[in-house]
Each structure stands twice: as structure tokens, then as C-alpha cells.
Image (cartoon, grey):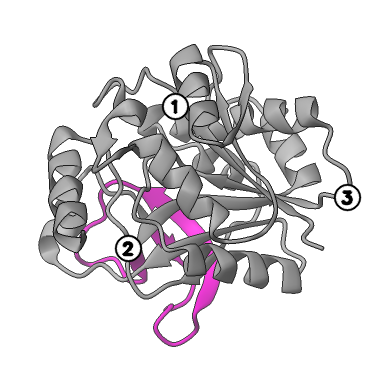
Amino acid sequence: MSRTVIIIPSRMAAKRLPGKPLLKLNNNTIITTVFKRAEKVDLGKVYVATEDEAIYEEVKKNGGNCIMTQKGHNSGSDRIFEAVSKLNLKNIKYVINLQGDEPLINPEDIKRLNSYVTLNNLDLGTLAANIVSEGKLNDNNIVKVKTSENLKKKDFSLALDFNRSFSKSETNVYHHIGIYQYKIETLKKFVNLKQSKKEKMLKLEQMRALENNIKIHVKLIDEAPIGIDTMQDYIDIKKIMSYKN
């Protein structure tokens, strides 16, 4: 029996693309596409955690599990902890924070993260992929992670830093994927910490962990899916999914 639960934080008020969870990709909304992909991982129940009635109704209408949370959370992980606390899940050791704007996430990559974290009894793990072009390196909509070791030689390492921009001279820099797997007690520790300076400045929640000496292990996957941060991302993904169908 799996001891991992997947929870997807989702809200309508994204600054760069407001209302994006309910934008359509083929016949489904973005949030429905994400939770259905997560269900394919087959780790047990998948939940969406939201502050918006419209998202709640969309998820329930499409057969998903959804829980209402309060407004004003500082990060998706803060929202997920509220959901975990309300759900009172039994025999769960880990929670995966799968971001709601990753409709092309590969379910097999989520399985790889879970296997890596659970087999090594890690506190916090995430995924990364090679940066395939200079354009991606210079794109400030793409979050990058710098690791202590070369992931091409060893497919996991510790995160040293996260940023939207690293200089070309930096080594061991990869495309960060929007997913985290926490031990429940690590998540509790995380949400009880104040927002860090770099978290606020960069708008990257993972900096709260690094700045408080919580180790983040990074596992390499073959390819970074396109996340939806901007209208152009949305247009690009619509084209990809229309072509596949």
C-alpha cells in the first residue's frame, strides 16, 4: 500500500495568467488535465487543494477529489499542509506537491521521484532536466536549479540554489520541474518557518527550505515538460496537445 498522497494546489489568481486552471486544453481544463495525469501514477487518491469555488466545482464535476482551503497562503506547500491537516490521512508518510500548471507532466517521472525519495528515506525531493537551448537558459519564466554534482554523471544530487537566471559560466545548472515530495514532518517544519528573503524576492518557495538548511535532493529526468506560466505557454501547449490528438 502506498504511503504517498498527491495534492495539487490550485487558485485562480495567478498574476501572469489569471484564471489559468480553467482554461481549456482540448476537452478538459488545465486543472482537470493535471489531476487526471496524477491519477495515472496510481499512488492512491489524488486531491486538488483550492481557495476557489469555481475550481472545486470543476474538479468534482470531473470525478476528482477536491478540498477547500483558506485564501492568502504564501505558497502551494502552505496550502497543501492545510489540506493534509484537514484530510487527516492515515498511514501517509509523504506528500507530493504537484503544481497545477504542469499538464504535460509524465506520470512515470512522478513514479521515479516517489521511488527515489521513499527508497532513500529523504526529507524533500524534486526533479530537474537538462536545459536544451540557450533560449531556455535565458528565459526568466523557467526556474533553474544549481546542483552540487553533475546530474549527467550521477542522476541525483543536492540543490545548492534556485533562480530564474544563472550566468553561462555557472556549472551544474538544470531546468527545475514544478514538483516536490515532502515527508509530512518536513512539510510541517517548512510551513512553520517564516518566508525567507530570497523566497520573497524571487517568488520561489523552495528558497525557504534552502535558507533554513532543509536539504533538497534533485533527481534527473529525461525531458522537462512545458509548464504554463504565460499566455504563450498556453498557446504552445494547446498546439502540442491538438497535434497529439
Q: Earlier in the sequence, mark 3 or mark 2?
A: 3
In the displayed structure image, the side of residue 81 where residue 166 appears, left or right: left
What amino acid is labelled 1 in the image?
Lys
- From the viewer's side, name the closer residue of 239 and 163: 239
Residue annotated with mark 3: 91
> Which mark's residue is nearer the viewer, 3 or 2?
3
**Which residue is found at the position 12% from the left and 64% from the top?**
134
At which x and y percent is residue 90?
Answer: 88, 43
In the displayed structure image, the side of residue 91 where residue 74 appears, left or right: left
Is 33 placed above or below 177 here?
Answer: above
Mark 1, Cα crowd under 10 Å, few <14 / some 14-19 / many 20+, is: few
In the displayed structure image, the side of residue 22 where residue 65 appears, left or right: right
Q: Earlier in the sequence, mark 1 or mark 3?
A: 3
What amino acid is labelled 3 in the image?
Asn
- Per the rendered image, the range of residues in magenta is 145-173
What amino acid is labelled 2 in the image?
Ala
- From the viewer's side, name the closer residue of 214 and 97: 97
Residue annotated with mark 2: 224
Q: Secondary structure at mark 3?
A: loop
- From the viewer's side, name the closer residue of 239 and 218: 239
